[in-house]
Amino acid sequence: MTTRALPPVINTTEAQRRGWACVWCRAALGIGLGDDLGEQRVKPADGAAYSWFPRQCSDTVACQARETS
Ligand SMILES: [Zn+2]
């Protein structure tokens, strides 16, 4: 499990916030695939607090290759 700091939620897509796509490389993740990074709570300055549910690829080497390409 990574200890990287998550990207700012503002920089993520809806799919990434819902755990449908990798939070790092944006690859689509199938149901039950990828690693759950846990519920994240956000309190925007101008809105109501909400949660998002980042997931990442299980294959971190391939993930990083995609992220940096
Ligand atoms: Zn990835």
Image: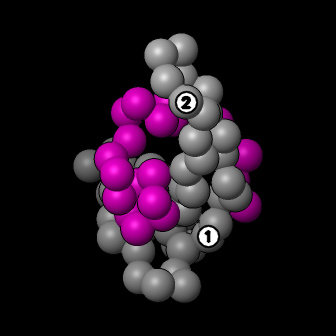
Q: Is residue 41 left or right of residue 7?
A: right
Q: Which label number is shown at residue 13?
A: none
Task: Give the residue at x 55% y 55%.
Answer: 54
Furthest-left residue in view?
69
Circle 2: residue type: Ala
In the image, is residue 24 part of the stretch drawn in magenta? no
Location of residue 68 in the rendering, given as x and y in whole percent from the top left corner: 34, 45
Question: Compared with residue 47, is residue 22 higher up or lower down, i.e. above or below?
Answer: below
Q: Is residue 64 above or below residue 50?
A: below
Mainly helix, strand or loop, the magenta region?
Answer: loop
Looking at the figure, which quarter contains the N terminus? Answer: bottom right
- The three-letter code of the residue at mark 1 reads Asp
Q: Position of residue 17 (x, y in %)?
A: 45, 52
* Residue found 52% across the figure and 81% down from its top: 33
Residue 10: image x %, image y %? 41, 30
Numbered range of the magenta stretch = 1-23
Query: Which one is earlier in the sequence, the residue at label 1 or at label 2?
Result: 1
Kindly report the distance in space between the C-alpha atoms of the residues bearing marks 1 and 2. 27 Å
- Residue neighbourhood size for the residue with mark 1, other residues' Cα within 10 Å, grouped as few (<14), some (14–19), many (≥20): some
Q: Is residue 61 visible?
A: no
Disc 1: which residue: 35
Is 52 left, or right, of 29 in this rendering? right
Number of marks: 2
- The reply to whether the residue tagged 2 has its Cβ within 8 angstroms of ligand 1 is no
Residue under circle 2?
48
Q: Quadrant of residue 40?
A: top right
Q: Callout 2: few (<14), some (14-19), or many (20+) C-alpha neighbours within 10 Å?
A: few
Whether residue 11 appears in magenta in the rendering, the answer is yes
| Marks 1, 2: nearer the viewer | 2
Q: Where residue 27 sits in the image (x, y, percent)?
A: 33, 65
